[in-house]
Image (tube, grey):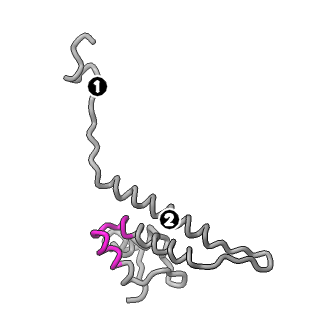
């Protein structure tokens, strides 16, 4: 499938929403093929946030297998990139969990039926 992205179609295309969430919006620096992101979306119950988290988890695995090195004053530390991707994935999973929860508000004031009159 290759790489596709269009900001103009964000509202109607989950694939593009996933790319935006993970910052994978340019073909030259793309981390994922369309087919991979589409598979994550399907495996995660058609949830953009969960699919985005899955993509970042996969990136973290990829980064953690790379060797860190120093050369001529340049330092590349892939473990930091892996930690960052894992943290971002965790945040997306939290957002996804919160998006489906219902919060029940309980009223405790002078008009509440749970407080005796005159209290």
Specify whether 80 is left or right of 49. right
Left or right of residue 41, residue 72 in this image: right
Which residues are the magenta region? 38-51
Q: Position of residue 105 (x, y in %)?
A: 28, 36
Which residue occupies 66% across, 72% down? 77
Q: Tell me the residue at 31%/70% (across/down).
A: 44
Give the labeled residue for mark 1: 108
Pick whichever, 115 or 63, lies toward us.
63
- The quarter of the rendered structure image containing the N terminus is bottom left
The secondary structure type at the circle numbered 2 is helix
Relative depth, front residue between 28 and 101: 101
- Which of the labelled discs sits on residue 86, or is there none? 2
Q: Residue at x 29, y 55 (%)?
A: 100
Number of other residues with Cα within 10 Å of mark 1, as a class: few under 14, some 14 to 19, many 20 or more: few
Residue 84 vertical position relative to residue 109 in the rendered view, above or below: below
Near mark 2 (Cα within 10 A), the count class, few <14, some 14-19 or many ≥20, is: many
Q: State the predominant SS element of the stretch in magenta.
A: helix
Q: Position of residue 88 (x, y in %)?
A: 49, 62
Magenta highlight on residue 49: yes
Q: Is residue 53 left or right of residue 12?
A: right
Front-most of 110 and 9?
110
């Amino acid at each position: 499938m290759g790489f596709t992205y269009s900001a103009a179609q964000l509202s109607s295309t989950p694939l593009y929403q996933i790319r935006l969430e993970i910052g994978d919006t340019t073909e030259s620096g793309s981390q994922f093929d369309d087919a991979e992101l589409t598979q994550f979306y399907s495996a995660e119950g058609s949830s953009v946030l969960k699919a985005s988290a899955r993509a970042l988890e996969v990136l973290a695995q990829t980064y953690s297998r790379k060797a860190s090195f120093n050369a001529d004053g340049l330092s590349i530390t892939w473990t930091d990139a892996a930690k960052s991707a894992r943290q971002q994935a965790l945040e997306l999973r939290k957002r996804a969990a919160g998006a489906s929860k219902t919060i029940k508000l309980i009223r405790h004031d002078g008009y509440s039926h749970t407080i005796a009159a005159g209290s």
